[in-house]
Amino acid sequence: MPRGDRSLEAVYLATRAVGTAASDVAVHNKEVFAWRDTGWFSDLGPGGLVVALDRKPMQAALLELGSVYAERREANWDGYGARAVHRFTYQKAQEFINNLPSAVGTPEIGADPDGEIALEWYRSASRLLSISLALNGRLTYIYRNGATRMRGTFWFLDDEVPMELVKLLEVLRA
């Protein structure tokens, strides 16, 4: 895998290694984590440095999520019988956004009529990733990037964003 393609994945993995995604500052010196069996620290650049990334896109997403939840926490919010967004679904979406690498950019946030939270990264009609997040952590997605089209399910469990999803976002971002 080319070095540029590994950058977001490496930052995400390093962020997970220190146990927090509230900030993308992961490692100042690779010797600090020499006791951990993680070969990917060598891919982070000279001296094992990870650049601090701006969390403002994720803060904007959290604000938008709060607005969506406030507007859609009652049943029939669309006038056509839509289910309410459950507070636990809202909390799961907060956790998901807090664990995303900030380099993926700000998703558009919405709610589906079945009460799931919708997150979408839209670049154009032929370049997008749309995710529906359910209360139980199920992530149903649709990915389109030119001729490549995929759909499926991932799981957001134990506060870990699936690496396959991070890779899709990296390709979409490029």
Image (cartoon, rainbow, N blue to C red):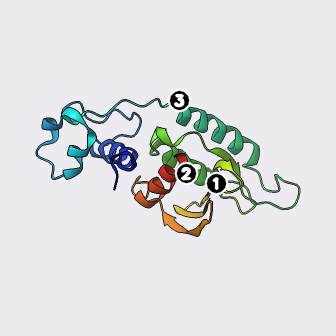
Task: Tell me whether the residue at label 2 lies in contact with that at label 3, contact meaning CB atoms closer than 8 angstroms.
Answer: no
Residue drawn at 83 percent across, 56 percent down: 76
Q: Which is more N-terminal, label 3 or label 2?
A: 3
Q: Amino acid at mark 1?
A: Arg
Spatial CA span between label 2 and label 3: 20 Å
Residue drawn at 59 percent across, 54 percent down: 89
Whether 153 is drawn above or below 2: the answer is below
Task: Tell me whether the residue at label 1 lies in contact with that at label 2, contact meaning CB atoms closer than 8 angstroms.
Answer: yes
Residue 85 point in image, percent of width and height: 68, 54
Residue indicated by mark 2: 172
Q: Secondary structure at mark 3?
A: helix
Q: Which is more N-terminal, label 2 or label 1?
A: 1
Instruction: Find residue 56 and name its label.
Output: 3
Instruction: Find residue 127 and name its label.
Output: 1
Residue 95 point in image, percent of width and height: 49, 47
Spatial CA span between label 1 and label 3: 23 Å
Of residues 59 and 37, the one nearer the viewer is 37
Please state if 95 lies on the left or on the right of 87 as rendered. Answer: left
Task: Tell me whether the residue at label 1 lies in contact with that at label 3, contact meaning CB atoms closer than 8 angstroms.
Answer: no
Q: Amino acid at mark 3?
A: Lys
Instruction: Find residue 9 and name its label.
Output: none
Please state if 79 lies on the left or on the right of 27 as rendered. Answer: right
Residue 65 point in image, percent of width and height: 64, 42
Circle 2 residues within 10 Å: few <14, some 14–19, many ≥20: some
Circle 3 residues within 10 Å: few <14, some 14–19, many ≥20: few
Q: How many marks?
A: 3
Q: Secondary structure at mark 2?
A: helix
Of residues 142 and 67, the one nearer the viewer is 142
